Amino acid sequence: MPQHITIHLAGENALIIYFSQKGDGQVSANVSAKVQQAEQLIRKAMAQELGYELAKDIIDLVPSYASLMVMFNMMTTDHHQVRNKLRTLLQTIDQNSTEQVNSYKANLVELPVYYSHESGPDLSVIAQRAQLTVEQVIELHQAQEYRVYAIGFAPGFAYLGEVDERIAAPRLATPRMKVPKGAVAIADRQTAVYPSVSPGGWNLIGLCPVNMFDAKASPSMPVNVGDRVKFNAISKKEFLSLGGVLEVSYE
Amino acid sequence: MNKAPSTQGFVVDQPGMLSLIQDAGRFGAFNIGLTNGGPVDLLAFQWANRLCRNTLNATAIEISLGGLTLTAQVDTTLAVTGADMPLTINGEVRVLWRSYHVKAGDVVALGFATQGLRCYLAVADGFNISPSFGSTATVCREGVGGLHGGKLLAGDVLACGPNSTNNEANKNLVLVEKSRPKYENEIILHTVPSYQQHHFSSYQQHLFFSNEYTVSKSFDRMGYRLEGQAITCDIEGILSEGICHGAVQIPADGQPIVLLNDRQTIGGYPKIGAVSSIDTAKLGQLKQGGKVRFEPISMEQAHNIFHLNLSYFNRTELVVCD
């Protein structure tokens, strides 16, 4: 297999392929492109069979920043067999997929955000840590376009990267029991919009009125992996007129 | 014979605390952020379906805590398995782990669990619910599955076909007492060390595998937060990555969270390992105060445990009881 691609145990019915040093490395568009390439290879093999009989063995594929989790069916296979099949497939991964990243035409999706203390209870903590004003934090968050690295955690939850180092913030020691729908958040150098009410440990800096997941709509989500996203500040009045709801409690 | 329209089945009179439509789970949509859902206690769910002569993926109801009351609109067969939850049909006390013929108008009621937490109510041929993203499993957090993406509500009608109850091929079945799962308050969670295990020192791993943990007040279908010896990791967070069933996440406060059916698909807390599915089914029957210990096992042992249990399930036969 190409260098830096390793297969590890995840659980009794899952393996995880890391595409950089054990998956705890830096966010990289290049690594992310390799993940996508591997996912496409495996999906193609599942569709075409190719003698690997992957379709009945693989239950789910979960791509992320630098990893691809492969869940398999314990009734039909085991981790040795899956590992061997994956090794064979991954042989063909292009060592240098930079061209592929550059040739990819990404959509630009613009998302409005109401940044404030009432909609972003962790804004001041981030500002204090960075020795910036709250206004500067808000400015930095909007300053750049982000790449959609993964979708997961919840339907429509898009992991965007990377935020300016100055506003990077570790996850909360104890996750909140309830984060409101539309919460715009930061964890380390990742940023995201919570698509629905859920528990969560990210730092909350604002609220976005756009619906990030609608099971009945097609497509279900406004963004795809590989898209570019830009945030634009809006006023409270604009937020409310766009259908935004202000939560009173953050548990 | 007067065939009832397919919109009929059972009417929900009282929905109880948390009653959910579930099939075996939603697979293949993890990449767009849809988790698996499905029965927390898969074994009890499968027994309920076998008692109704169903396929193992037939749609049933998972009842957590209790309090569900249904009225039948059709003649059919049903079975309840799982936690010790008092079951009555038309006010008469009935035992779990066996099937019963019911007639239109019969009232099926579950009280509250005295031991264990969740029960499964299956009907012959399963409830007829249209699938979302390939499955009927309800995941409330996602608003996906079931009748309307949430828990059962009073007035919901759960369609199911009528089922002949008076011929030789449809006699009631029972799982004999010695073959039924036991729901204990203290359990062992066999865990495959995996994921970021190497970021926990051998001392921290020793602490994790030698201390007892208590189920905290935060336990649900997404995960069970435990309380006990805090575990520290060399790293604070990782690039978010796929989370498998049973993964044991260690947030910065050091208190383990075992992730179950409704877990987030991707997350960035370090994970020390993953609990076997046989044991997550037992964990899902615990309430606050339940005690657990983690025991490390190899991937080979995990496969052995899984296949031994599967073999036992397949060769245990149900007994005709009337």
Image (cartoon, helix red, strand yellow):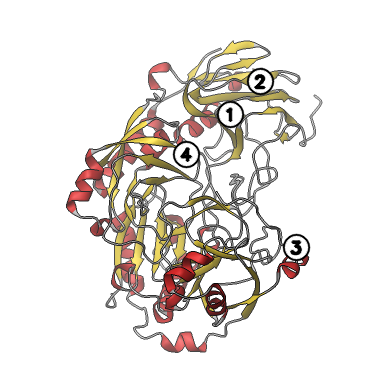
Residue A83 placement (x, y as % from top left): 31, 62
User: Which quadrant, please, contains the N terminus of chain B?
Assistant: top right
Residue B25 placement (x, y as % from top left): 53, 46
Question: Please, what is the three-letter code of the amino acid marked with disc 4?
Answer: Phe
Residue A203 placement (x, y as % from top left): 49, 62
Mark 4–mark 3 CB contact (< 8 Å): no
Q: Check residue B108 in the rendering and tell me which mark sits there, or answer none.
A: 2
Mark 2 nearby-residue class (10 Å; few <14, some 14–19, many ≥20): many
Determine whether the residue tagged by mark 1 lies in a helix, strand or loop. strand
Q: CA distance from mark 2 to mark 1?
A: 10 Å
> Please, is residue B136 above or below residue B252 in the view?
above
Residue named by callout 1: B121
Q: Is residue A26 left or right of residue A200?
A: left
Residue named by callout 4: B219
**Does the rendering let one see residue A53?**
no
Q: What residue is shown at x 36% (from left), y 50% (from top)? A: B253
Question: Please, what is the three-letter code of the amino acid marked with disc 1?
Answer: Leu
- Which-is-in-front pick, marks 4 and 1? 4
Determine whether the residue tagged by mark 3 lies in a helix, strand or loop. loop
Chain to which the residue tagged by mark 2 belongs: B
Mark 2–mark 1 CB contact (< 8 Å): yes
Residue named by callout 3: A243
Mark 4–mark 1 CB contact (< 8 Å): no
Chain to which the residue tagged by mark 3 belongs: A
Which residue is outermost to the left? B203
Question: Please, what is the three-letter code of the amino acid marked with disc 2?
Answer: Val
Q: What residue is shown at x 63% (from left), y 50% (from top)? A: B144
Which corner quadrant of the image does residue B314 belong to?
top left
Determine whether the residue tagged by mark 4 lies in a helix, strand or loop. strand
Q: CA distance from mark 4 to mark 1?
A: 22 Å
The tag earlier along the polypeptide, 4 or 1, is 1
Q: Check residue A4 in the rendering and tell me which mark sits there, or answer none.
A: none
